[in-house]
Image: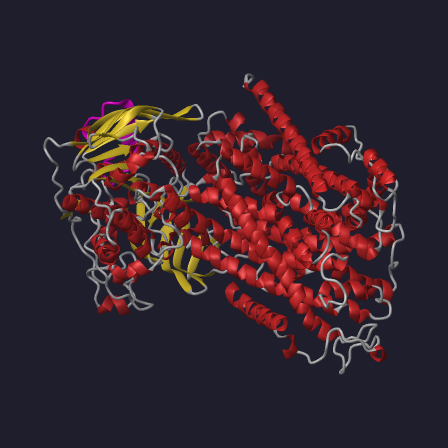
Amino acid sequence: MKTQAPSRRARALRAGAARLAGVVAVLWGAATLAFLALALIPGDPVTILLGPFTTASQEIRDQIAADHDLDKPLYQRYLIYLGNLVTGDMGESYQLQKPVFDALAEALGPTVELALAAVVIAVGIAVVSAVLTAGREGRLHRLATAWELIAVSLPSHWLGILLLTAFSFQLKIFPVVGGSGAAALVLPALTLALPIAGVLAQVLREGLEAALAQPFAVTARARGLSRREVRLRHALRHAAVPLATLSGWLAGTLLGGAVIVETVFGRPGFGALALQSAMNKDMPVLIGIVLVSALVFVVLSALIDAFHLLVDPRLRT
Amino acid sequence: MSPLLTVDGLGVTFPGTHAVRDVSFTLDKGECLAIVGESGSGKSVTARSLVGLAGDTAGVTARTLEFDGTDLTGLGERGWRRVRGGRIGLVLQDALVSLDPLRTVGAEIAEALRAHRDVPRAQVRGEVLRLLERAGVPEPEVRAGQYPHQLSGGLRQRALIASALAGDPDLLIADEPTTALDVTVQARVLDLLDQLKAEGRALLLISHDLAVVSRLADRVAVMYGGLLVEEGSTREILDGPRHPYTRALAAAVPSAAARGTRLAPVRHVGEPALADGCPYAARCARADDLCRTTPPPPAPLRCHHPERGPVLRVVGPAVERPEAGERLLTVEGVSKAYGGRPAVRDASLYLDRGEALGVVGESGSGKTTLARIALGLVKPDSGTVTFAGVPWSELPERRRRPLRRRVQTIVQDPLGSFDPRHDSGALLGEALGLAGVPRSARRARAADLLDRVGLPSSVARRRPAELSGGQRQRVAIARALASEPELIVCDEPVSALDVSVQAQILDLLTALRADLSLSLLFISHDLGVIAHISDRVAVMKDAEIVETEETVRLLSSPAHPYSRDLFAAVPSLAVDPA
Amino acid sequence: MRDRLRRPSLVLAWAALALLALAALFPGLFTGRSPIEVDAALSLRPPGPDHWFGTDQLGRDQYARVVHGARPSLVIGLGAILFAVAAGALYGLASALLGRFADRVLMGVADILLALPQLLLALVALAVLGSGQVNVMIAIALAFLPGYARLMRAEARVVRTSGYVETSVTLGQGPVARAFRHVLPNALGPLLILASAGFGMSLIAASALSFLGFGAEPPSPEWGVMLAEGRALLQSAWWLGVFPGAAITLTVVAVTIAGRAAQARFTRRTAG
């Protein structure tokens, strides 16, 4: 037994190192792809920088090109760019007159707030809906599948407009646009959460049903456990496993959804910033957003994998 | 004194089917009753309805369903929960899925304990360890902290039995408790169940295997089509079965003694019975209009035309074994390792033209890897395979391809070996095309092949997924025959089949050997099957061939200690003289 | 039991899809009005017998606009999904069959793309390509591609090690015949099934990008554009924000129901 302990630790360390290498690889890859996208962009970056309506002299244009290292060959620009990234320097925004880092830092807060609220709402709705309806025949079951289907089919830009119309313009319960505080968060968070809740509820319910159909569920009931005990003590854990595989999808949907939700509700944040920089071809900012998204994804997957290991002992050996 | 369990007139319906009809039996303390039947016979549904777990859509009716003075028919959910685990324990097949894979074995047993007994928290662990020890689990302290997937199949099954014993039930229902286990492990689990019976518990054993239950059961009940067709003492059922189905079942068990005889009765396809008639009528050679229209007479022998006397065996086609045959396949000192672990180590064997060589061993012994090396699908790390004088294993695939038609294979799961998009005709057509049969002749040849394996030509238009397990295996055999091979490597070809279907396939393979002088390399974990079909047998254990011998000599005097253990553990229909 | 309960919804879904296809091909069958004709006198009429879905600020009939919007709304989503499936299948197959080095590189790139939100990926593509309907199609296809490529590769690898491909070796079939007779057709099935569900997602994405101002442009009656235009007037004209969105949602629901039914049939067929 004792001889196993160090080898297991060594294995865990090696797994951790491999994981870290994977994280670095994805970030480096994302940075490289972003750089290539920037290099591929048709049209002269200097013109984009100056905006469509200026007529600058060639001297000024050259100066700007030199400032942004645009006069250097591609591979040099790539190396400079990577070197800057390592020190956290993502360059200057073309449009916002401030470092990309600052622009991202300002936008991060409101979006994190929105995303967390949405996740809490979505998970809450999904667990309640799934536990109440899994394995039940009849009307309740049909009702559950119907609402899940509609929830996953709702475009969030329409859902946001509907909620705004109903609760802000007609009933006047929530503020219309912008604003701060909890009241301003309710409708955006709900808009972001509902389609996610639909997917989560579906996966969770199917997971529960699959677990309840397994022989061990019969064994547990043959032991004298009640239906509810089997559901909560045995099946729910099994249903959490497929849920974990959705982590990547969840991160993407939250960030992508934020683009739309923040636009509809006029909120500041990551999504609004992404949209604005895509419209203005503000590539440094867009690249910054890409990198932060990749980082969020990678960190989230690592966390979810750890959760996976915690729940499913079969993965540990 | 009234019996512990009385079942009278039990019926179970599901929407659209009548799964169990008018089943009656009784069971006393310290007694073991075995219910034997093939899949779909209603045996598991019968067992589960005794603990109220036949399913949400099941409609259960009974004249009497009484356990130890308690009427089970009137129980609500709360009452059932006291019975389940506390009075009647249930053990299912394959503990890998019957124990919660996400929880430790100890937690599962503790849960069962808490459901029925008021054990103080501090004593739960001690009680769990005691239960594991009772079930014969070594090192209970270590095992209690492990998960089902970390235990071997035998230990897992013991842990499952321990959890069923936690509530100290008077009756233990075991549904196929040893089906997924190797024979030597199976023998030890059966010993454990025997021990529980000796302690005075009643045991209801559900199995598809007449031989397995015969060593444990006091009485045997045979089910077919939802009906308990025959019941009697184990000796009566084995020595002189009277229901035609029981007789067919007894004759279907392959063994060395049954060599040269047909295992399955000559195939009889009769008209199906009316709803109330005898369910076996469609397959029964003795069935008449009375059988098809009138319910069979009441228990214990539910047959209008029972038979008498010992089961007669029909002599099958003679397989001629050449005296000094031509060497067809030679395997010399092959080894193959996966990730540092040897799967096959220094194995040597030979096979003469027209001969059948069996390879027997338990799971993980390396049989399948050996088969794949012989097929040229896996290249051995060392050693050589020679086929018909050609260096088979050393050829590059391009050079081996033209020779491949001479060696074919059939496997345990034929469905996986068929492209799911094609019907049987297209699958046979493809094989015939690769064997060089011109397109115009393929359709007729495919019909010939289907006929050869006993299938109607209409099967050609159906996809394998729509066929029964036995039919699929026949299509697989037909495809293997398409290129007129000299050798067929069979990897557990009958292991997934019911006994009666297995009997038909074994008969078919024997007949094909006789007609086509085929050679077989036959892999199986089932010694009865191996002994029935092989001329010589190689015994594998832990990646090595420990003994190769003529079948008859091996069975009478096995030389290697492992062979002796293996044969001692094999269940047989012979009744224990004690 | 379940099948019977599902069947009416499946029939309704196919009926809805048929109507949508008709509206996209022959909008004149459903309305005689023009979707773009301006009439200031009819500005902002609420829904009523004359104008079922009301009118907008410019007096355009919203019903006519929703009907005529079917074509641009469906075309972008359909084009995107077809493009994504074709490119994803080729990409995945190349990764599965071209050897270890190509596999590493191709899947490495796919993994990086998978780490990014699909909508963000589409936005980056649009920033590079510029807006326009064809570019939106390409952008959505690019966002969906890595997922399809991964699935195709996984399926191809499963099929390659399956019992029937192994059997075709023992029957003496060569590698090229094997790839085309067994590997490709069997690996493509799950991909097409996933794509039928992905069609719904690509419709939503296309509508969202038009809503954000990248795809179709006013005065096109594309549903996302209609929502964007109506958004400014929600306070006074609620109907402008309701009907185009309902059209998108109903389309996606119908597509999803039909896609799931196809998936269930496919699984039944292969599982037997």
Picture colour scheme: secondary structure
Is residue B412 something that shows in the picture? Answer: no
In the rendered image, the residue lying farthest to the bottom is: C49
Question: Residue at the location (87% across, 59% down)?
Answer: A176
Q: Please state the horizontal and vertical placement of residue A317, each as a whole percent of the image.
A: 54, 30
Q: Nearer the viewer, residue A245 or C138?
A: C138
Give whichever of B420, C140 is nearer the camera.
C140
Closer to us: A312 or C9:
C9
Q: Is residue B12 visible?
A: yes
Q: Could you tell me which residue is drawn at 55 percent across and 57 percent down?
A: B76
The span picked out in magenta is B555-578
B160 w.r.t. B424: above or below:
above
Residue B188 point in image, percent of width and height: 37, 32
Quadrant housing the C terminus of chain C: bottom left
Q: Position of residue C93 (x, y in %)?
A: 50, 44
Please identify the residue farthest to the left as the structure is shown. B323
Quick check: A135 left or right of B36?
Answer: right
Give the image quarter of residue B400.
top left
Q: Is residue B369 left or right of residue B551?
A: right
- A144 in relation to B196, above or below: below
Decide whether residue A119 is among the magenta residues: no
Number of residue marks: 0
Q: In screen coordinates, is B179 left or right of A87? A: left
Seen as rendered, the residue at the extreme front is A58
Q: Residue at x 55, y 40 (%)?
A: B112
Residue C104 position in % (x across, y down):
55, 35
Please check the rendered image and state whether residue B567 is part of the magenta-colored stretch, yes or no: yes
User: What's the residue at 60%, 48% (across, down)?
Assistant: C145
